[in-house]
Amino acid sequence: MSGSHNGTPARETLPDMATRTSPPPHEALARAAEVGIHRIPLPTPFAIGDVNVHVVEGDPLTLVDCGPNSATALGALEAGLERLGHRLTDVGRVVVTHQHADHVGLVAAIVERSGAEVACLDLLAPVVEDGESHSRRDDDDALVLMGRHGVESHVAEALHSVATITRHWTSSAPVAVRVPDGGRLEIGGRDWTVHHRPGHSPSDTVLHHAGDRIAFTGDHLLARVSSNALVSRPLGEWDGRRPRPLVAYRESLRATRELDLAIALGGHGDPVVDHRTLVDERLAQQDERAARILQMLGPGPCSAHGLAVAMWGQVAVTQVYLTLSEILGHLDLLLDAGAVVEDVADDAVVLFRQA
Ligand SMILES: [Zn+2]
């Protein structure tokens, strides 16, 4: 979800998700620094921990992502810039990789202080310009989705209230530069290709510099945690059908796999230096989880939330939207494989059973 459910703790991972333990690729950061790209980690209130802001030297001085809307994050950003010999007022451009609060939250404060122009994927621009109403709409969508998939109404209502409170982690600003999928964006005096890679969020963007074989990947591909594919309304035209973020995410991962890439600078943690291996791992983990869900479903029928509770117990209640998204995403893979059917009746909880 955008700003709001983004505030749900542990958005990016669940306890049993695989984590990787490869050593921090300092060499990758050193190489990025050689071409004028520096990482500033900022604290977030979310379970994922720090978010990476990347500073790109050049004219204009550019930030890729900006951290959550908090005084603590702003202070850390200013201190990080100072260590690099810059001030916040020197920033001339902010590029946003996706709509979540930990990446766009400080945009208003940065623009206000520096007068920087904001650049992003064209589809993302309306969300950056009016995060509040997009968050509200996403929260309302989420309430309906939870009800349709078996979450008790008092639990869904409680989450809806929490989401309202967490909206202040995000902010909005006018977007000066809107780039279409496949278009070019100048960052640090060089041309980067902008790729729309929806899945983790509907607006995930990968910015690729072919010459340096470097990309900014936001939360599309993270070294140590599997990015969740949260159910969220697609941007632009929407036919009203349930979004299928995990299906979209896998397509996006396969497209990113094809990029010629030495270093992927992500929104959290260390850079990815072996993106093809990592994509293959992520796809295999998803296949395994789908198989496990099919096994748990048995002959069925069962609601998606029922499956989440069976799989994660209490976690499925405290993190109900995240676990529901996980289950629905993998059910979509099983539906596409013809292993599962979905019984949809008016006003009734949607049930899944083995085909
Ligand atoms: Zn993030």
Image: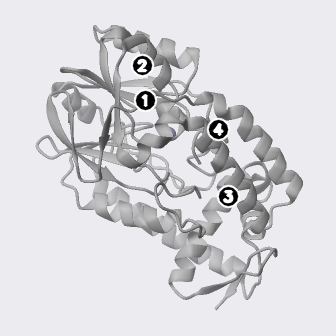
Where residue 7 is drawn, which disc sits there? Answer: 4
Q: Which of marks 3 and 2 is nearer the N terminus?
A: 2
Image disc number at residue 323: 3
Residue for point 57% across, 55% down: 232
Circle 2: element type: helix
Of callouts 4 and 2, the N-terminal one: 4
Q: Residues within 10 Å of mark 3 (few under 14, many from 20)?
A: many
Relative to residue 257, is residue 293 depicted above or below? below
Q: How far apart are marks 4 and 3 (CA)?
A: 14 Å
Q: Which residue lies furthest to the left in this view?
A: 211
Which amino acid, by three-letter code, is at mark 1?
Pro
> Toward the viewer: 194 or 134?
134
* Snapshot colouring: one colour
Asked if marks 4 and 3 touch (Cβ < 8 Å), the reply is no
Tag 3 near tag 2, CB within 8 Å: no
Q: Where is residue 355 in the image (x, y as percent from the top left)?
A: 64, 92
| Residue 255 coordinates in the image, percent (x, y) | 30, 62
Q: Determine the secondary structure under disc 1.
A: loop
Query: Mark 1 highlights which residue?
Result: 174
**Residue type for callout 4:** Gly
**Looking at the image, do the residues carrying marks 4 and 2 touch, with CB atoms under 8 Å apart?**
no
Could you say which quadrant of the image residue 218 lies in?
Answer: top left
Question: Is residue 5 visible to us here?
Answer: yes
